[in-house]
Image: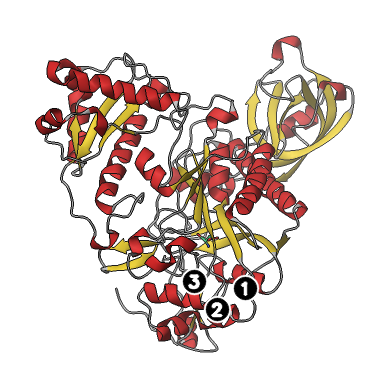
């Protein structure tokens, strides 16, 4: 193995096989860096010692595949390479066999400047030879094995579920597979094994998991792929805390496999708290939370600032930003205003204004109190001199959604717009000043680098403005809170679900829920979603029937494996950790898929393609 030779091997014979990573021809001496999966070793061809082998080495070019027999030698002191593990030795070649030649590749695995991504994806087999990709794929393997081992040690069985199935209800478009035997009928590729894993609970496999491919035909972004891999699990009789414990366990094992010790249990926060404090259901806790400082303004001040009586005023604080010029601050505020939903109140001009100075003192006081309370701004001391602080309020008071009926403590629809816009501004500012506050840089301390969080008690329904109806926020098999059952029809917006997400540094790693296990309640939910009994039977009849045969209470979750590996690899795209990914247009550039198929194939399937 090319990466395994060490000083202790000096004097030994060795046989190495691999690719010519680089070749330096100094006339009477030719150096080759020979590469395989384990690393590189320098091979020396010396004309004086072995003219025939040296002559043959003159034929070598980048990416030729060769075998070398030689003797391991300690390198001269001035040629030792401290940067690689094999840097103290070299292999002096006695014999050389060229196993295969190679065309000059469009880019070299050894190049430090990356080829453009299209090239990398088209010639993926060359790209995968690069160190960084070898590292990422190995990391993926280690993480997957660690998760499997952990779950297996906890009594979970890995059970496969079909890829050719019925449409599943995760809310995206399905990829369809036409049936030849039953022309006009289609299988759907699963968006997740949701119903199968629930049926496995009904089947008596009380702890199931699967590292499984899922397929969703969605508009793609950097962090989405049409086919992606989930760590999917389900268990019988759990409280949510039991599911969280299992997830914390396997994430601990996965992070350990990547060399990081993480602490559990993870902090928890309800969806409503997350929206109020971070304006997001996936809070990034590497920076301070927002604080509602409406209490800092008295009636006269509210009047002057045109703030409604009970209107929230949110403070966004980005620490350690340092000097920001007046012009830049105005620019930031202008940009924030353009967002449409926000009105910005400049904290600094508040400070300059004698009449309002008192309010800004109170704003500071509120912040400091939140730090004293320990949560959620623990670890972020206020430092007015270097913190960038702005205050925002809503642009307009939107009318309340009629069905919300003033239920507390739920975030109301009209406030939500303000909280989420402010949350977005918080993130934009955090990114803009990332170099200054440094909170996104890895420190090597896992408790700072990896801020995990459980977000719990999600809304059961979301109002679909376009369709003018309530839709399932997660999926329709999620159990509502017992306490909210009576609001299913009267006030769907207030119903909270036993649904939870696990979040890391502002990214959703996975989501799950305790499920409905009673057929009558499942019917009720379908009804609340506007499905007639017949429609529910048509789509999910098999499942409704299964629920009637003794279904244990159950719950589970699914986490994105690609995303976890991406974060552990420090990569900025899922494509860096998926061996054969697709582009943003869902194309595999290497095999050139998708493609049209022959008339004969279409005919067999009873399909005619319309000209689009
Ligand atoms: N099937 C769900 C999803 O893919 C996860 C779950 O509820 O377990 O999002």
Separation of marks 2 and 1 at Cα, in angstroms: 8 Å
Q: Which residue is mark 3?
A: 168
- Looking at marks 2 and 1 on the same chain, the residue that comes earlier in the sequence is marked by 1
Q: Which residue is mark 1?
A: 199
**Left or right: where 210 falls relative to 69:** left
Q: Residue at x 11, y 35 (%)?
A: 306
Residue 496 in percent (x, y) is at 42, 58
Circles 2 and 1, Cβ within 8 Å, touching? The answer is yes
Query: To which quarter of the image does residue 138 belong?
Result: top right
Nearer to us of marks 1 and 3 is 1
Q: Residue at x 58, y 38 (%)?
A: 568
Density class for disc 2 (Cα within 10 Å; few <14, some 14-19, many ≥20) is some
Density class for disc 3 (Cα within 10 Å; few <14, some 14-19, many ≥20) is many
Q: Nearer the viewer, residue 606 or 358?
A: 358
Query: To which quarter of the image does residue 258 belong?
Result: top right
Separation of marks 1 and 3 at Cα, in angstroms: 13 Å
- Looking at marks 3 and 2 on the same chain, the residue that comes earlier in the sequence is marked by 3
Disc 2 under 8 Å from ligand 1? The reply is no
User: Which element carries disc 1, helix, strand or loop?
Assistant: helix
Q: Is residue 144 at least partly visible in the picture?
A: yes
Residue 326 in percent (x, y) is at 18, 18
- Residue furthest to the top in view is 78
Q: Which residue is mark 2?
A: 543
Disc 3 under 8 Å from ligand 1? The reply is yes
Q: Nearer the viewer, residue 474 or 311?
A: 311
Report the number of numbered marks. 3
Separation of marks 3 and 2 at Cα, in angstroms: 11 Å
**Left or right: where 473 falls relative to 545:** left
Q: For the N terminus, which image quadrant?
A: top right
Circles 3 and 2, Cβ within 8 Å, touching? The answer is no
Q: Is residue 63 at least partly visible in the picture?
A: no
Residue 183, label in figure: none
């Amino acid at each position: 193995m090319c990466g395994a030779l060490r000083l202790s091997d000096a004097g030994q014979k060795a046989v190495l096989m691999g690719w010519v990573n680089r070749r330096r021809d100094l006339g009477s001496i030719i150096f080759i860096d020979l590469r395989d999966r384990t690393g590189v070793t320098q091979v020396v061809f010396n004309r004086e010692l072995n003219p025939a082998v040296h002559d043959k080495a003159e034929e070598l070019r980048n990416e030729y595949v060769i075998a070398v027999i030689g003797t391991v030698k300690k390198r001269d002191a001035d040629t030792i390479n401290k940067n690689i593990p094999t840097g103290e030795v070299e292999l002096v070649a006695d014999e050389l066999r060229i196993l295969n030649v190679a065309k000059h590749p469009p880019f070299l695995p050894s190049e430090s400047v990356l080829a453009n991504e299209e090239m990398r994806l088209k010639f993926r087999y060359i790209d995968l030879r690069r160190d960084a990709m070898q590292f990422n794929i190995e990391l993926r393997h280690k993480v997957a094995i660690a998760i499997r081992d952990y779950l297996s040690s906890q009594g979970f069985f890995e059970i496969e579920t079909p890829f050719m199935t019925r449409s599943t209800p995760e809310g995206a478009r399905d990829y369809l597979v036409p049936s030849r035997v039953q022309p006009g009928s289609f299988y759907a590729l699963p968006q997740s094994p949701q119903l199968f894993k629930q049926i496995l609970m009904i089947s008596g496999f009380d702890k199931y998991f699967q590292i499984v491919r899922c397929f969703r035909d969605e508009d793609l972004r950097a962090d989405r792929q049409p086919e992606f891999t989930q760590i999917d699990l389900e268990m019988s009789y759990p409280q949510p805390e039991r599911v969280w414990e299992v997830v914390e366990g396997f994430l601990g094992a996965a992070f350990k496999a990547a060399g990081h010790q993480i602490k559990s249990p993870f902090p928890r926060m309800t969806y409503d708290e997350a929206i109020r404090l971070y304006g997001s259901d996936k809070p990034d806790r590497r920076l301070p939370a927002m604080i509602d400082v409406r209490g800092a303004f008295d009636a006269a001040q509210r009047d002057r600032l045109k703030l409604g009586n009970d209107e929230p005023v949110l403070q966004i604080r980005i620490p350690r930003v340092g000097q920001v010029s007046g012009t830049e601050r105005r620019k930031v505020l202008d940009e924030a205003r353009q967002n449409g939903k926000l009105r910005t109140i400049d904290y600094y001009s508040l400070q300059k204004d004698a009449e309002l100075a008192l309010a800004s003192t109170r704003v500071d006081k509120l912040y400091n109190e939140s730090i004293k309370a320990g949560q959620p701004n623990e670890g972020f001391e206020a430092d007015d001199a270097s913190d960038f602080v702005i205050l925002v309020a809503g642009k307009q008071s939107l009318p309340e959604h009629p069905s919300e009926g003033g239920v507390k403590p739920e975030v109301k629809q009209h406030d939500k717009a303000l909280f989420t816009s402010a949350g977005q501004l918080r993130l934009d500012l955090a990114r803009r000043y990332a170099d200054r506050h440094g909170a996104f840089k890895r420190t090597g301390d896992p408790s700072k680098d990896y801020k995990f969080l459980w977000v719990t008690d999600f809304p059961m329904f979301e109002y679909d403005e376009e369709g003018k109806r309530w839709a399932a926020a997660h999926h329709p098999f999620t159990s509502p809170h017992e306490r909210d059952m009576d609001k299913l029809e009267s006030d769907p917006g207030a119903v909270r679900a036993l649904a939870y997400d696990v979040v890391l540094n502002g990214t959703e790693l996975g989501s799950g829920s305790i499920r409905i296990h009673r057929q009558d309640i499942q019917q009720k939910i379908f009804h609340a979603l506007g499905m007639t009994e017949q429609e529910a039977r048509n789509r999910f009849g098999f499942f409704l029937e299964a629920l009637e045969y003794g279904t244990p209470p159950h719950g589970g979750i699914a986490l994105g494996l690609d995303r976890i590996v991406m974060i552990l690899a420090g990569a900025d795209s899922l494509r860096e950790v998926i061996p054969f990914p697709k582009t943003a247009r869902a194309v595999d550039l290497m095999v050139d898929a998708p493609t049209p198929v022959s008339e004969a194939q279409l005919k067999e399937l009873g399909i005619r393609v319309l000209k689009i």
